[in-house]
Image: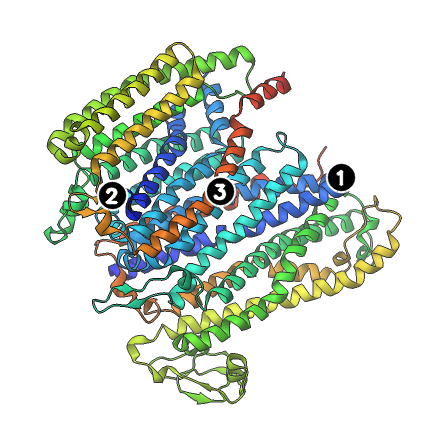
């Protein structure tokens, strides 16, 4: 394996691993804080149980995120010293700010996890809120630095090839910063919220089935699951969990396509090669079609097997059906990103995101109707544990189970789009990835080492979460 | 030439962050050392005390390391690139240690309480806690001795990648770092409230760590001597910086006074005094190194002034750090007040009896 490929693979693997934990570090604190808020408000002990379990999961995932993030901060230099030497002074600022956001997150997570009995309930909730806010802020700062790699501003290249007129503030305010950070933060809430919602939808389906079999009720009657309170504790637990998870995940999933539009228009303007690659657009065209599916062929310079919607790409990318979309033919072959990977990853991201948005809309519609009806009915019987409106729609619960992993798959696909789509540049149009790599030989060794290490950690984390948190939910004495 | 230039101030900030990492994060590694060396009738209680002490704070303490890295690559990018190339191997090994230490500690906290499971994570945590600080020290030793600065990339990578840090001096600095961190941890643990122990057992535990602190305090002297002896051949400039001039002498005197105070306070069971003295001792050692290496960021040739980022970057970073500290310092104070404050220790003893 050539060293450049090994370095790129190690970086890609490290990021793909870390991003899962980073995203959970943004989303989970939001879930646990909402649950704790509900506990303080309603004094319903199920919410406290929920907050504590989610906190436990957050603790495990946050720790792995913290150490894998540390590895990344060093890897920037270990693998790309020439990139960091050039970029450090320009874009180090958001990393420094991220450092402080991360400090706040770690400090208040420590207080949150170990402080249940040591500080006042309101202070505890405030600590959790600070974890959630600073977690989102760290994500924003890091993504700002990545946005700069896509839209490098805040410096000029001097006669000797080094940056001059450095302006870290202009670098932070780069044109990709807003669209990328918005897209990432929404993705974090959508992915975390929907994966948790999926788990609890699955448990509710299982409880329904168990209850239905035990009472040998007809399948039609089991639509009203409140009539079979065989395991009320578990039911109450999963109902509340589903509601909180959907509250965090669904709105983000619903607005995410709009933020995707903002991102796409940024790419169309600033990174024409990336746009052309993600659409499989080889020829420059006025009124370009949107391709759904397709298998780009770089040698033949065409994208066969695609369903083409006329004018739609020009319309989406430039909000004008007759706009010109530049094809890859307009650019030297050496400046093309790997077209097939980028196109397929983009298609996957859009398909996954659209499905998530549609299922979330369905859940929102059911809640809107059912919630209002239930509010009227239960106005004077607050303590009765009534079913959530979603339980009347078993197919919605099943859809939520199917959608559960999609957020994380979409995130991995989306990062493939933005990172591979930026190639062959590490700083778009300024520094080539091949010029940034370390001269250290034998990079396959650390690549394989970290891959094995992370695979092991991944297996242990999944097993721990399952054994210590999921498996122990249910009726307690 | 004024000392108070922008690059110097930022360099001091890097040393300050490293100092904070050493006295906070370093002690967490030291805790792992004592987990590995737990012995006697209170073996289990010792490990529980260490876990309670580290649990709420280690992640916050760990962020200092990230701050150091970020400050170096933002403000001294040439030095960062140089370190990352020449020290690729030990830094990579250290990172594996960082990953294993943190994750094994967390897995132990949240996994099954069965002994076999606990020991598996405990052993991983403890061994990683020993290896990581040694490698950190090795990297600093290689930097201080000029090994990083002198490495000639044209001479073939194998010799550069290994020879620059596999030196007796760098390894001695690694050992010194480990012993220092263990000493800090043992000293702090004499003050740690034992949540799950009775009053008399808590006192016995404190005595266990008092003895460990005294022994490791003596080991610190021995390791320091070893480093200084090896510095004669390996890092003559560093040694000259450490031994010549009025400032060096003054710093040595303060360091020695702090070290003796720490030992005397441990001997007489004045643990709060011992903690402050140990912190002062470690800080003096770190600033002594920084002073001896001044004005170089990568000795023997790259100076702080020559290696610094453009002034606008330095100024903005300083402002950013200043703003960050206004959030960080009260937050840290709150964290340590909750978990390390004296009153809560007594409260907890009351609650558990």
Mark 3 vs 2, N-terminal side? 2
Distance from disc 1 to disc 2, alpha carbons, whole Å, reads 63 Å
Residue A328 position within the rendered picture, expressed as x and y whole percent measured from the top left: 37, 81
Report crowding for label 2: few under 14, some 14 to 19, many 20 or more residues within 10 A (C-alpha): few
Residue beneath disc 1: A43
- From what the image shows, is residue A477 above or below residue A203? above
Q: Is residue B1 left or right of residue B33?
A: left
Distance from disc 1 to disc 3, alpha carbons, whole Å, reads 35 Å
SS at mark 1 in the image? loop
Q: How is the image coloured?
A: rainbow
Extreme-front residue of the structure: B1
Of residues B88 and B176, the one nearer the viewer is B176
Camera-nearest label, 1 or 3: 3
Q: Chain of mark 2?
A: B
The residue under the point 37% across, 50% down is A73
Residue beneath disc 2: B2
Residue A389 position within the rendered picture, expressed as x and y whole percent measured from the top left: 77, 57
Mark 3–mark 2 CB contact (< 8 Å): no
Residue beneath disc 3: B326
Q: In this orientation, does residue A226 appear?
A: yes
Q: Quadrant of the image for the N terminus of chain A?
A: bottom left
Q: Chain of mark 3?
A: B
SS at mark 2 in the image? loop
Q: In this orientation, does residue A460 appear?
A: no
- From what the image shows, is residue A280 above or below residue A199? below
Residue A310 position within the rendered picture, expressed as x and y whole percent measured from the top left: 54, 88
Mark 1–mark 3 CB contact (< 8 Å): no
Residue A12 numbered mark, or none: none
């Amino acid at each position: 394996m050539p060293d450049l490929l090994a370095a790129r693979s190690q970086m890609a693997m490290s990021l793909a691993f870390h991003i899962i934990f980073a995203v959970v570090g943004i989303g989970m604190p939001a879930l646990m804080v909402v649950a704790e808020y509900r506990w303080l408000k309603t004094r319903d002990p199920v919410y406290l149980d929920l907050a504590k379990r989610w906190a436990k999961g957050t603790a495990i995932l946050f720790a792995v995120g913290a150490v894998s993030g540390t590895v990344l901060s060093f890897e920037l230099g270990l693998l790309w010293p020439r990139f960091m030497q050039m970029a450090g002074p320009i874009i180090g600022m958001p990393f420094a700010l991220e450092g402080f956001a991360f400090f706040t997150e770690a400090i208040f997570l420590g207080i949150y996890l170990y402080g249940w009995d040591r500080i006042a309930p309101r202070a505890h909730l405030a600590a959790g809120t600070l974890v959630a806010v600073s977690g989102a802020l760290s994500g924003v700062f890091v993504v700002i630095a990545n946005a700069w790699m896509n839209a490098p501003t805040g410096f000029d290249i001097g006669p000797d090839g080094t940056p001059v007129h450095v302006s870290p503030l202009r670098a932070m305010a780069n044109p990709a910063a807003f669209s990328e950070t918005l897209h990432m933060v929404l993705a974090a809430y959508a992915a975390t919220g929907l994966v948790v919602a999926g788990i609890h939808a699955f448990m509710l389906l299982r409880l329904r089935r168990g209850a239905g079999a035990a009472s040998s009720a007809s399948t039609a009657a089991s639509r009203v699951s409140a009539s079979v309170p065989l395991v009320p504790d578990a039911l109450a637990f999963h109902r509340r969990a589903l509601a909180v998870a959907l509250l965090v995940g669904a709105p983000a999933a619903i607005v995410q396509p709009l933020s995707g539009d903002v991102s796409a228009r940024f790419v169309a303007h600033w990174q024409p090669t990336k746009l052309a690659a993600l659409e499989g657009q080889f020829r420059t065209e006025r009124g370009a079609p949107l391709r759904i599916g397709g298998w780009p062929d770089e040698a033949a310079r065409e994208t066969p097997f695609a369903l083409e919607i006329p004018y739609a790409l020009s319309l989406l990318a430039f909000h004008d059906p007759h706009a010109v979309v530049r094809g890859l033919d307009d650019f030297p072959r050496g400046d093309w990103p790997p077209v097939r990977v980028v196109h397929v990853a983009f298609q996957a991201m859009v398909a996954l995101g659209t499905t998530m948005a549609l299922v979330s809309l369905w859940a929102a519609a059911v809640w809107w109707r059912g919630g209002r009806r239930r509010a009227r009915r239960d106005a004077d019987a607050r303590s009765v544990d009534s079913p959530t409106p979603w339980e009347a729609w078993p197919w919605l619960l099943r859809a939520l189970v199917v959608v559960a992993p999609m957020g994380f798959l979409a995130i991995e696909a989306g990062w493939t789009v933005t990172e591979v789509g930026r190639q062959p540049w590490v700083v778009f149009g300024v520094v080539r990835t091949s010029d940034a790599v370390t001269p250290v030989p034998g990079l396959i060794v650390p690549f394989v080492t970290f891959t094995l290490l992370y695979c092991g950690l991944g297996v242990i984390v999944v097993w721990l979460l399952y054994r210590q948190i999921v498996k122990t939910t249910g009726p307690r004495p | 030439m004024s000392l108070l230039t922008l690059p110097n101030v930022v360099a001091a900030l890097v040393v300050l962050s490293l100092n904070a990492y050493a006295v906070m994060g370093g002690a967490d590694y030291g805790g792992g050392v004592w987990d590995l060396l737990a012995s006697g009738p209170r073996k289990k209680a010792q490990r529980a005390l260490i876990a309670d002490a580290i649990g709420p704070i280690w992640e916050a303490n760990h962020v200092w390391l990230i701050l150091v890295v970020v400050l170096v690559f933002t403000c001294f990018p040439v030095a960062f690139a140089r370190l990352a190339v020449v020290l690729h191997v030990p830094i990579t090994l250290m990172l594996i240690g960082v990953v294993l230490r943190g994750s094994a500690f967390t897995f132990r906290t949240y996994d099954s309480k069965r002994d076999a499971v606990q020991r598996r994570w405990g052993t991983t945590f403890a061994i990683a806690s020993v290896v990581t600080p040694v490698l950190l020290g090795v990297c600093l030793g290689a930097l201080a001795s000029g090994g990083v600065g002198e490495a000639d990339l044209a001479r073939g990578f194998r010799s550069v990648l290994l020879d620059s840090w596999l030196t007796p001096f760098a390894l001695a600095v690694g050992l010194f770092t480990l012993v220092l961190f263990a000493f800090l941890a043992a000293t702090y643990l004499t003050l740690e409230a034992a949540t799950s122990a009775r009053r008399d057992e808590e006192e016995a535990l404190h005595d266990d760590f008092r003895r460990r602190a005294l022994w490791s305090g003596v080991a610190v002297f021995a390791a320091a001597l070893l480093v200084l002896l090896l510095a004669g051949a390996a890092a003559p400039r560093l040694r000259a910086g450490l031994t010549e001039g009025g400032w060096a002498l003054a710093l040595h005197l303060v360091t020695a006074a702090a070290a003796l105070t720490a030992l005397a306070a441990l001997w007489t069971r004045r643990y709060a005094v011992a903690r402050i003295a140990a912190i002062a001792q470690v800080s003096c050692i770190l600033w002594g190194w920084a002073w001896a290496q001044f004005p170089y960021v990568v000795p023997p040739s790259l100076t702080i002034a020559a290696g610094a980022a453009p002034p606008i970057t330095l100024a903005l970073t300083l402002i950013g750090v200043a703003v960050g500290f206004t959030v960080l310092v009260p937050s840290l104070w709150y964290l340590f007040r909750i978990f390390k404050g004296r009153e809560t220790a007594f409260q907890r003893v009351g609650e558990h009896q």
